[in-house]
Amino acid sequence: MKGLIESSFAKAEKGAVAYGNHASADIEGIIRRSEIELADYELKQGYLTLSDKRSADTALIDKVIKTICAIANNGPNRIGKLIIGVTDKESDAARIVELDKIAPKKVGKRFVVGINREAKVLGKSVEDYYAMWKNAIKASGLSAHLRDSVLSNIDFNGFYGLGVIIVTIPPQKELSYVNDEVYWREGDSTLKADTAKQIAALAQRF
């Protein structure tokens, strides 16, 4: 049987995108949980603004890095998730439909708009778009223990043709920093610890 059918198959080329363990059902579950467990989850619609010029949101990567740090500082037994390609604003989803001519998928109160559309606008492959985020994390000022564990836990899911990037923040054993700054979560907000007392209180979680 193998001899009869093997000529009908072609060898697959291995792409640069890392397809991880997140199935579509898992992603839907994460999105639904993000509505309740605010401190452990963060959603970002993408890298580009929703203006007609579609310029890069230059502050976004910095915000994402700080949010990763803040989620890591929730405590040693907490796992966090950050998904790129999802918005919680219906107005943003409607604007993306207008700009990118895609059909978002509604999950709970959130809208999956994906990152494939942004890769197309930027003239990048999905692999290059994924690498852009991974390289940004690699070059960031995140504490080495956090940076390395996050880089080992980034993956991509095609999610109904829309494409999302899932960044998992594994449990940490010590306080994390961005350069010399400490960040923490209050609900779905990322805040900087401004006083020694705040930093000491966060360190006591570990």
Image (cartoon, rainbow, N blue to C red):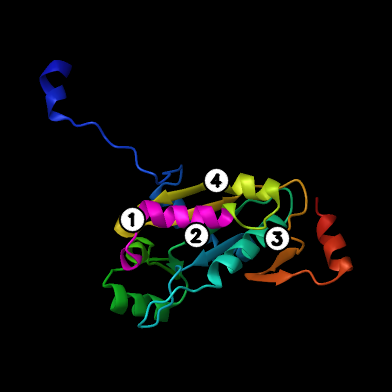
Residues at marks 1 and 3, CA–CA distance in whole angstroms: 29 Å
Q: In the figure, is residue 72 to the left or right of 81?
A: right
Residues at marks 1 and 4, CA–CA distance in whole angstroms: 21 Å
Task: Say which residue label 2 marks.
Answer: 83
| Magenta part of the chain | 120-137
Q: Along the line of sight, which residue is nearer the eye, 31 or 71?
A: 71
Point out residue 32 in the picture as x, y percentages from the top left corner.
49, 61
Point out residue 50 in the picture as x, y percentages from the top left corner.
40, 79
Residue 149 in sight from this viewpoint? yes
Query: Is 45 drawn above or below residue 202 in the view shown?
Result: below
Residue at 61 percent across and 65 percent down: it is 38
Task: Say which residue label 3 marks.
Answer: 178
* Amino acid at dot 2: Ile
Q: In the figure, is residue 122 to the left or right of 139?
A: left
* Amino acid at dot 1: Ser
Q: Secondary structure at mark 3?
A: loop
Labels 4 and 3: the sequence-earlier one: 4
Labels 2 and 3: the sequence-earlier one: 2
| Residue 122 is covered by the magenta coloring | yes
Q: Along the line of sight, which residue is nearer the eye, 126 or 22?
A: 126
Task: Say which residue label 4 marks.
Answer: 153
| Residue 184 is covered by the magenta coloring | no
